[in-house]
Image: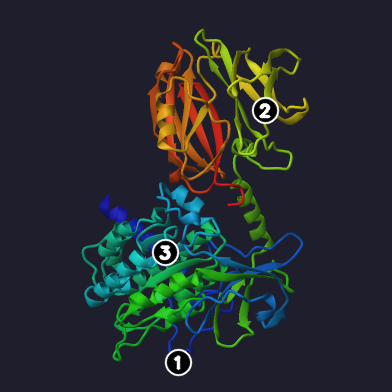
Amino acid sequence: MRKHLLAVVSAVIAVATLGAQQPSSQPAPSQPPAAQTPATQTPSAQTPAPAPQPPPGQQPPVFKAGTNQVRVDVSVVDRKGEPVTDLTKDDFDVKEDGVTQTIETIKLVEATGVAPDDDMSLTIRSPEHAAVEAARDDIRVFVIFWDEYHIGEMAPAMRARAALTDFVQSAFGPTDLVALTDQLTPTDAIRFTRDRRDLSEQVHKLKGRQGVYMPARSPVEEAQMYRTRDIEMLRAQVTASALESTIAFLGALKEGRKSILFVSQTIGRLGSSVQDTFSWLDKAIRIANANNTTIYSFDPRGLDMTIRASDVLQSLAEQTGGRQFANNYPAAALREIVKNSSAFYLLGYASAKNPADGKFHKISVKVKRSGVEVKSRTGYFAPSLVDMDTARKKALADEAPPEISKALSHLVDAPHMPVAGDLWAGAAPGPDGKPRVTVTWTPRDGAPDGAVSVRASTDDGHVYFDGPVRSNRVTFDAAPGTLRVRRKIIDADGAVADNQDTTVDVPNFAGAPLSLSSPVVFRARTPLELRAIQHEPDPAPFAGRQFERTDRVVVRFGVVGTSAADAMVTATLVSRRGATLATLPMKTIASGTTAGKGYEIDLPIGSVGRGEYVIAIEASRGADQVKTLVSFRVGSPQQ
């Protein structure tokens, strides 16, 4: 069995090797002269070139409907290395394939890594949570790629660990996302964090394994040992393939800029001769440019007159808008990576060519101002019509589920929305098991004074309640079905100062084996308010669904019915795109009825980033399943 496994792995490596060695059918980005870096002859070099195809995982540039829109981001720094932030589109000269382009749009993107209002950073709770955070324009994303196959075991590894330890501890802002990976880490195992101590501990465990083959880290490495003569070639190809996969992974996270710090000494060895292999990293350059990813290379050997710096690593950095670091004091130099991501320009132009030709188009950007340095990607791979159709289908697949969109629709601010306050209505079984409806009004700051009344009726005109609301809350019995509730504020002159309508679905608690009462939300802005919610027998619900980072939210609900006692109950925090961010802890409380169980969720809003979210509450027992959603917003819509 073990030999069979190794044989299978060896076969996979052989197939991957042939795939990685296929020559590119498109013109390569500019490279150092062939005399300086000889091209490496590969076994597949004699096979016919395949039809032009975008690299796997490549994310094409954005093209707006009806136009050939291309977007390129540009970093501009002065002689001191500080970002230049006062440029206009007239200051730029952009050419595509040598043809001058007319810049139509320009946007300065500034991301300092500091949370608004001096909020502390948020702990990343899951890969899904990291993906949601990474998609934001104001969040910077970095990956440190440790090329352990091409880092010396002793001095280079120690120098690199020391520099990276200082880098991760002091260079990043509180909201920056950073991940550490290597060539044997699959992309689905890459974990972003904001925990600098955790990053330091990861860096401390890194090892250089150049020329070290035993012990093997994985079955893949064990399979490499069966091809001893080609092991260095295999290692170089594994590194290149892993780098390409990491770039594609970042491209799937967001369209905005991403940065990779590639820590390595050199790439490629055949037999006893060492030579850099541009053909193996050419695809990485193309994918990086297509996915808006800047690569910085770091040679941990430092400055040594007896050591020749890697031309391929320098080309990898320069052709993706980054730079190579190879000095004796790298810790300070590495900070440039973060600084370059703090401010850059997004330039948009309408390409004069057909963007659906499936070819690589070179881009050059210059600034008409002296004393500045310009960094940008060198081009893009235009998607074909088939690629764009596939992308559209993927975008449709990534849309939020309809139930999430419906839940979030209640949070939309519009001119017709009330300014006086928020209205909430919910249903729960009363002591006798029959539905009881509670209507709550929470005034907003500056709400007009006046008498508040509520009218609750069905579509056929049956009225269950019509009268004044005392202490901003009213409770009454109702039958199962849809109930329409209208709240009015009558000013001193008798005129209607404000209206607000809502609907509530009243469950048939007595007739269903399993049902959920409407979740009741409470807001605590101070420890005193939290104690009141915890200890008062009947605290006032909060009708609003907008919270600040200093708030604490308590959600209470009941599971009712003959299946309630044995039902599995869960509560999850869901992003506005439907991604599960975290499972929320719950505790049981008194339900108020003998036919059900009560539950409470305690959610500190300080653990949630600004944005819109949904709490999905589910209960199930066998075929009986029920679900309800509670949407809310953290921070104002303008934040």
Using the rendered view, name the quadrant where residue 416 is placed: top right
Local secondary structure at mark 3: strand
Label number found at residue 143: 3
- The answer to whether 585 appears left or right of 557 in the picture is left
Local secondary structure at mark 2: strand
In this rendered view, identify the residue nearer to me: 121 or 268. 121
Cα–Cα span, label 3 and label 1: 33 Å
Q: Position of residue 353 (x, y in %)?
A: 73, 73
Q: Position of residue 238 (x, y in %)?
A: 38, 67
In this rendered view, identify the residue nearer to me: 94 or 610. 610
Residue placed at 51% from the left, 44% from the top?
548
Question: Residue flagged by tag 1: what amino acid is it?
Answer: Ala
Residue matched to label 1: 35
Residue matched to label 2: 502
Whether residues under marks 2 and 1 lie with C-beta atoms below 8 angstroms apart, the answer is no
Local secondary structure at mark 1: loop
> Is residue 268 among what the camera can see?
no
In this rendered view, identify the residue nearer to me: 312 or 525. 525
Neighbourhood count class around disc 2 (C-alpha, 10 Å): few under 14, some 14–19, many 20 upward: some
Q: Of the two numbered discs 2 and 1 on the same chain, state the one appearing first in sequence.
A: 1
